[in-house]
Amino acid sequence: MELQPIYIQILALVLFTIGLITALARRNVFFVLMGVELALNAVNLSFVGFAKTLPAELSVAGQIVPLFSIAVAAAEACVGLALVILIFRNSESVDSDNYSNMKG
């Protein structure tokens, strides 16, 4: 029995929705960053799911794009967490509403 690509896309849609809701509904910056990471991983899963439907020569592109996306997401997480640590040192809070009154 072979796993159908539609089930992979449905799983990716559910994960993306959970990540989007988490990123938009939470006030804690750590939860917002986790929601963004979950949404990015859902997109990567979708790429790999679509790559499964292609012939072997073309399937490689659908598997390499998520690899670069994971590398960019890891760099984004490092920079995001560094910014959160620096802001926490000044305001002693990880509530995202506290950051809205900062003027640059």
Image (cartoon, rainbow, N blue to C red):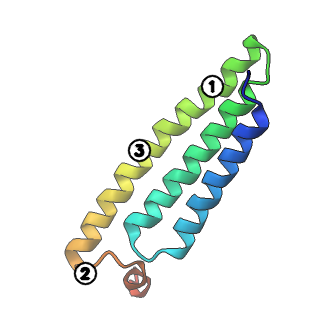
For label 1, count other residues whose C-alpha is less than 10 Å away and answer few (under 14), some (14-19) or many (20+): some
Quadrant containing the C terminus is bottom left
Q: Of discs 1 and 2, which sits in the foreground?
A: 1
The residue beneath circle 2 is 91
For label 3, count other residues whose C-alpha is less than 10 Å away and answer few (under 14), some (14-19) or many (20+): few
Q: Which of the marked residues, 1 or 3, is nearer the chain's N terminus?
A: 1
**How many circles with numbers are drawn on the protein?**
3
* Residue nearer the viewer, 36 or 53: 53
Residue type beneath disc 2: Ser
For label 2, count other residues whose C-alpha is less than 10 Å away and answer few (under 14), some (14-19) or many (20+): few
Residue type beneath disc 1: Gln
Residue type beneath disc 3: Ala
Name the element at disc 3.
helix
Indicate the position of residue 22 as horizontal and vertical percent values.
Answer: 53, 66
The quarter of the displayed image where residue 25 is located? bottom right
Indicate the position of residue 51 as horizontal and vertical percent values.
Answer: 72, 26
Name the element at disc 1.
helix
The residue beneath circle 1 is 63
Q: Of discs 1 and 3, which sits in the foreground?
A: 1
Indicate the position of residue 41 as horizontal and vertical percent values.
Answer: 55, 44
Horizontal arrangement in the rendering, residue 46 relative to residue 88 (left or right): right
The residue beneath circle 3 is 75
Residue placed at 73% from the left, 12% from the top? 56
Report, in whole angstroms, how far the alpha carbon at label 3 lies from the one at label 2: 24 Å
Residue placed at 38% from the left, 58% from the top? 80
Quadrant containing the N terminus is top right
Indicate the position of residue 81 as horizontal and vertical percent values.
Answer: 33, 58
Residue furthest top as drawn? 57
Residue placed at 57% from the left, 48% from the top? 40
Q: Which of the marked residues, 3 or 2, is nearer the chain's N terminus?
A: 3
Name the element at disc 2.
helix
